Amino acid sequence: MTLLVVVLGAAAYAGALPLYLLFRVSRPALALGAASEAITALNAQLTRRDSALHQTVRIVHALAPVASPRPDSLALARRLLVAGHEPLHIPPDAPIPSPLQVEVARIDEALSSLGDALAEIVIRLAQGQRADVATRLTAIDRLVEIAQERRIDGNRAARAYLIERQAALRAAESGARRDTVVWLVSGVALGFVLVVVMRRRVWRPLRELEAGLARVADGDLTVRVPIHATDEIGRLAQHFNAMTQVLGDRAEEQGRFAAAGELLAGVAHEVNNPLMAIAAHAENRLADPTLAEEPRSEMSQILRQARRAAKLLRGLLRFVRVTEREVTLVNLNDVVRGALDLVSYRFGVDEITVGGRLDPNLPAVEGDAIKLEQVVVNLLANAIDALRRIKPPRELTVDTWAADASVFVAVGDNGEGVAPEIAARLFRPFATTKGHRGTGLGLYISRQIAREAGGDLVLAAAPRGGARFSLSLPLAPATSPAVAPVAPPGPAVPQAEAVGRADGTPGGGRGASLAGVHVLIIEDEEGVRRPMARFLARRGAEVEEATDGVDGLGRLRVRAPDVARSARPSPSRRCASGPCLSRDAGEGHHATAACAADRSGPSCPRPAPAPPIAPGCCSGWCATGSPRSSSSRRGSPPAPSR
């Protein structure tokens, strides 16, 4: 509003002066012009009449001494008398003052009298009557003198009127010049006032906003700018304060989420060790041929559930871990399956039926598998939240298909749908329909991830009601590398050995002899160490156990094993991890990285010789003793430092 008022005021100031000058000077100038035009036209008529009558007077004087006047001279005299008797034509709106009109009437009267006298003497000359011609010529000369005198009086009156009009124009010009100077001086003063107003109402608030934005860019979300008025800039400051308030709240929430993610990663790693012990005990029991059928079935169920829990832990760790963007070939069916695994527990709790069709021949796309999984998880979570607001039946559908050089993933539900007024701002930051439960960033970030991958995320038409979101990504080029799975691969072991048979029997129980393999297990938790040692020993391996890093380092120096397995650093020792052991053992010692412990159950094929571990490669090993290039891929749980 302030800027609008300033602009309108400047426009009014700039336009008022020309209008004022127009009305101040143009009126007297137009009056002078109109008067000059009218007087000039009137003078032209009088001049024509006067000229015709004077020519007639000269003809009469020439014909008076002649006994018989020539007919053509008489005819010319008659024609001139007609022109001399022409009446004056004065427009009714002609700006002629009253004194001048009186003088014009007197001139017209004198010219008419002169014309009448000349007409009478011409008639007498034409009839040959010459008795009183001389007397009449004397009277005509007197009338000519009278007409000349009245013409002079009329010219004097016209000149006085024009001088008066010219004086009025000059007075108007002088007044306009004076008023222009006053106007310009007042404009300069008004300019200073506007500068002060603009400084207080526009420039200072904008500088405060700029400073606030700079502080926000530096990470200070507590900044607030003062609100000086209720105009546009005031409302802008109000929106800025609201934005920083929301950003601060969201940053606090994101901080809690990040802390919860780190806590979840640590807890998941801690929970993983008991799961490994449970799985190892179950596998050891299942390997006993004397185990009865009912206990065997129970052990198989225990092993199956332990592996399921380990799989969920790996999925959670993969989802919450912050990783660098890694673009690979991705099969969106694998992304959908991984996302469904993460939220599958809510389907039973909320009585949701999951349907849809995943195209088995779905081509690959290029993108970051973890970020794409986060997009699908967010869409699934939004659909679940929408379905919780309605009564059963609750249906959620997930479909994948390829069309028009793009691959699509659609997540739909039979909920209440999205209102039209909300749909227009659905993908904007901080737009949420969940109140304080939502951050308003899920769909916005999801669309950004999709667009970074060259695709898009849109709200599509739902044929059966509810809401339906469609994620589209372009097909991967034919020259791209092989498809990278979402879930991390397990250790470098055959699939049958890593997973086991369908009934829960360990897959490596037959034909996977470890005879001649020297294995060193460094683990401070006996519940994890002992089942693993028994499992490997039953396969023929020579197993040594170390309770901490110092013990393991001593055993390494005495005899270098084929395989060394260290799960995590000891809380009471200075070193227990595989990398540190390798570094402390010195150059020349080596351990096979091909065999570690599967997170869902230990298994170990016959290892291949591994190159010596150089002192500088300590930082490249992970908690399992494997090189980080293989086991630190996304999805592998980190070894938390204590």
Image: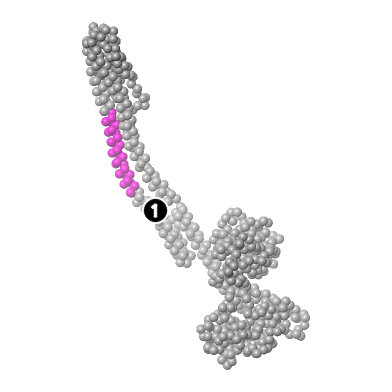
Q: Residues within 10 Å of mark 1 (few under 14, many from 20)?
A: some
Q: Quadrant of residue 333?
A: bottom right
Note whether 130 is above or below 193 in the view shown: above
The quadrant of the rendering that contains the C terminus is bottom right
Residue 105 located left or right of residue 373:
left
User: Which residue bears the numbered disc 1?
Assistant: 198
Residue 385 visible: no
| One can see residue 150 in this view | yes
Asked where in the image residue 83 lies, by quadrant, the reply is: top left
The residue positioned farthest toward the right in the image shown: 293
* Residue pictured at 25% horizontal, 25% vertical: 156
Identified at 57% across, 77% down, the residue is 632
Report the label total: 1
User: Quick check: 605 left or right of 288?
Assistant: left
- Per the image, is 143 magenta? no
Q: Is residue 507 left or right of residue 117?
A: right
226 is higher (above) or lower (below) than 104: below
Mark 1: which secondary structure? helix
**Rendered view: 513 above or below 130:** below
**The one of 268 and 308 positioned closer to us in this rendering:** 308
Q: Position of residue 377 (x, y in %)?
A: 62, 66
Could you say where residue 47 lies in the image, as x and y percent from the top left? 28, 23
Residue placed most toward the observer, 218 or 521: 521
Q: Which residue is at the front of the view, 262 or 586?
A: 586
Residue at the image position 53 percent from the left and 85 percent from the top: 614
Main SS of residues in magenta: helix
| Residue under the image location 62 percent in, 57 percent down | 460
Magenta range: 160-189
* Image quarter of residue 519: bottom right
Q: Amino acid at mark 1?
A: Met
Return the residue nearer the eye: 513 or 25. 513
Residue 238, percent across and down? 48, 57
